[in-house]
Every structure is written in C-alpha cells, then in structure tokens.
Amino acid sequence: MLSVVSVFKSGGDYFPKYVRVLRDAVRRHLPIEHRFVCLTDVEVACERIPLLHGWPSFYSKIEVFRPGLFDGPVLYLDLDTVICGDLSDLARLAGEVGFAAVCDPWNGHFNSSILAFTMDCSFIYHEFASRPRHYQRVHQRGGSSYGDQGFTERRLRERDVTIEYVDRLLPGQVINHFNIGAYGVPVEDARICMMMTRPKPHEVEGWVAKHWY
C-alpha cells in the first residue's frame, strides 16, 4: 500500500492544523487506497509515528528514512504543500521510481518538498544519525545544497542512485509559487503547488484558500 507521509516538528513555522489540512486534501484527491501518516513529536489528527530524535527544523525529515516504517512505496509531502488536483499520476509514479524528488527552483540540486521512493533509504538515516551535529555544520550554508536535502542528495549520489524528477516526469502537474506568484492563478493542469519559504498557505487568500482548508 502507498504511504503518504508528512513530518511535523513542533516549535517551527507550522501548527497542527497543517497536518489535518494536508490529510483531508490527500483524501479528496487521491482515489486509491493509501495510508496517511505523520512523523511528529505532538498529537495530530492522523496516524502518528513518534520522532525519535530532537533534530531541528528540516533535519527531522531525515527520520522518514528510518528502517521498518513503511511497506510499499512512499510519497512524502511537506506540510505547506497545496493540493489542487487529482494525485493519481503522482501516486502511480511513486510506485514506479527508485527515488524521485523535485527540481530546486534555484537550480543545481533537488528539493525535498516532494519525495517518492520504493528503494531502501535507511542508509541515509543511519549515516546522519551517526554524526548529526557534524552534518548539520557541513550543510548549514545557504543555497539549494544545504540542510536535509543537501545531505540526502549527497548520500544518494555517493551510491550512484539515479534521482528522477517528479516535475519533469509529470510536466505541468507540480508547480511552485515562485513560478506563478503566491497570488497568481495556477496553470490548468496543476495538481500540487509547493509553497516554499513565504508566504505560507494560511497567509494567502485567493486560489490557495480555495484548496487549503
């Protein structure tokens, strides 16, 4: 069964409503059987897997790669993802790729706002868990190669893993608000919009509010 996964680390930019909104949006737009689960350190309105570490901010996303959590393909979505159309193609893709991410809008690297994988990625978790403070220092610089996504990409490339790109495999279906403007109108075929940095979905009216509830 497909697992649709999110991560909510308390004390950051988000609040529990984000988990509920994403859960409901997935229910509305994903017609196939799936499991929606959140890795978190607080109570949430869905199946909950406790975070084991106090890794700050986006580094908590690396716990998605912990061994033994999921059977079958995994589709990871950031909490600030706005779903605005049918996710069937994305779900199908998640079951076909070894590892896929989205292109970073600043080029050169991948972005971890959306991940899909069927391969065993536990080596990513184990390596980070072995020296978390070291890797946080190494990847603290700005740019698209920093943070959890910089660490994850480097580990994959060290093993010569082919990284697919969701937005290239499903052209027009995955967009971000840098392309359209946070207050613009998404293209007709858009199914999912990434709201990187600011504004966040709860801060925006217009088309975002029609889908984020």
Image (cartoon, rainbow, N blue to C red):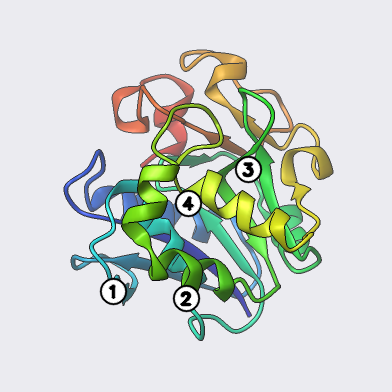
Q: Secondary structure at mark 2?
A: loop
Q: Are marks 3 and 2 in contact (CB under 8 Å)?
A: no
Measured as percent of width and height from the top left, residue 90 is found at 71, 54
Along the polypeptide, which appears first: circle 3 or circle 1? 1
The residue identified by callout 4 is 25
Q: Nearer the viewer, residue 133 or 98?
A: 133
Q: Residues within 10 Å of mark 4 (few under 14, many from 20)?
A: many
Q: Amino acid at mark 3?
A: Gly
Along the polypeptide, which appears first: circle 4 or circle 3? 4
Q: Amino acid at mark 4?
A: Ala
Q: CA distance from mark 4 to mark 1?
A: 27 Å
Q: Are marks 2 and 1 in contact (CB under 8 Å)?
A: yes
Q: CA distance from mark 4 to mark 3?
A: 9 Å
Q: Amino acid at mark 1?
A: Leu
Q: Nearer the viewer, residue 112 or 83?
A: 112
Q: Are marks 2 and 4 in contact (CB under 8 Å)?
A: no
Q: Residues within 10 Å of mark 3 (few under 14, many from 20)?
A: some
Along the polypeptide, which appears first: circle 3 or circle 2? 2
Q: Classify 49 as above or below 206.
A: below
Q: CA distance from mark 3 to mark 1?
A: 33 Å
Which numbered disc covers residue 52? 1
Q: CA distance from mark 2 to mark 4?
A: 26 Å
Measured as percent of width and height from the top left, residue 76 is found at 54, 58
Q: Classify 133 as above or below 113.
A: below
Q: Nearer the observer, disc 3 or disc 1?
A: 1
Q: Secondary structure at mark 1?
A: loop
Q: Classify 77 as above or below 124.
A: above
Along the polypeptide, which appears first: circle 4 or circle 1? 4
Q: Classify 206 as above or below 42.
A: above
- Residue at image point 73% right, 63% down: 159
- Residue at image point 66% right, 41% down: 102
